[in-house]
């Protein structure tokens, strides 16, 4: 009986840690992204290529995983049928207190009603 209980505890512990581990994108510096809120310091611009290479990986994440990875979105938009958009500013824009000389890139992630990413786009405003 004790041997079976130990096996169950080990299995459940492994299951919990595998489900709660932070999602990672390939060649993406999470710390640099988080340290540059709204892209005002221009650090996020250096991560744009990495984001472009990981668009498909972002589609595999849910809302909580995206927040863990990219932080709180700069804009949060609700849409019909319980869809939600998270918008992250990649480069400095009006929100940073300066008028940009070129269009600022944004990352937009659309979530379905179940909270799963369904569309990931990078665009210039």
Image: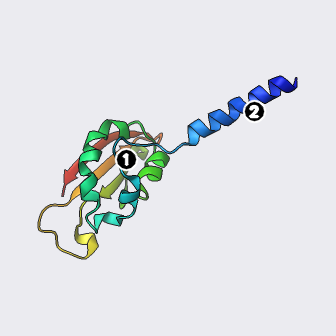
Residue 109 rendering spot, x and y as whole percentages: 34, 47
The extreme left residue here reads: 101
Q: Earlier in the sequence, mark 2 or mark 1?
A: 2
Q: Residue 62 at x, y = what percent? A: 46, 42
Is the Cβ of the residue at disc 2 closer than 8 Å to that at disc 1? no
Q: Residues within 10 Å of mark 1 (few under 14, many from 20)?
A: few
71 to 13, vertically: above or below: below
Task: Determine which quarter of the picture holds residue 89.
Answer: bottom left
Q: Which residue is mark 1?
A: 80
Residue 54 at x, y percent in the picture:
31, 40
Instruction: Provide the secondary structure element on which disc 2 rests.
Output: helix
- Is 60 drawn above or below residue 76 in the view shown? above
Where is residue 47 drawn, in percent x and y?
Answer: 28, 52
The answer to whether residue 99 is left or right of residue 21 is left
Q: Which mark is residue 97?
A: none
Is residue 88 positioned above or below 117 on the image?
A: below
Label total for image: 2
Quarter holding residue 7:
top right
Quickly name the residue at label 2: 9
Q: Nearer the viewer, residue 31 or 119?
A: 31
The structure residue drawn at horizontal position 40% and vertical position 45%, both measured from the top left corner, is 83
Q: CA distance from mark 2 to mark 1?
A: 43 Å
């Amino acid at each position: 009986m004790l041997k079976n209980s130990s096996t169950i505890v080990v299995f459940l512990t492994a299951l919990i840690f595998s489900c709660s581990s932070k999602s990672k994108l390939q060649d993406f510096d999470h710390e640099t992204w988080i340290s540059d809120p709204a892209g005002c310091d221009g650090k996020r611009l250096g991560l744009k290529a990495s984001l472009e290479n990981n668009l498909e990986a972002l589609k595999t994440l849910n809302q909580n995983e995206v927040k863990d990875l990219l932080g709180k979105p700069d804009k949060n938009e609700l849409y019909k049928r319980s869809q939600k958009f998270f918008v992250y500013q990649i480069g400095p824009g009006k929100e940073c207190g300066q008028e940009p000389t070129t269009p600022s890139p944004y990352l937009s992630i659309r979530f379905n009603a179940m909270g799963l990413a369904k569309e990931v786009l990078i665009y210039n405003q």
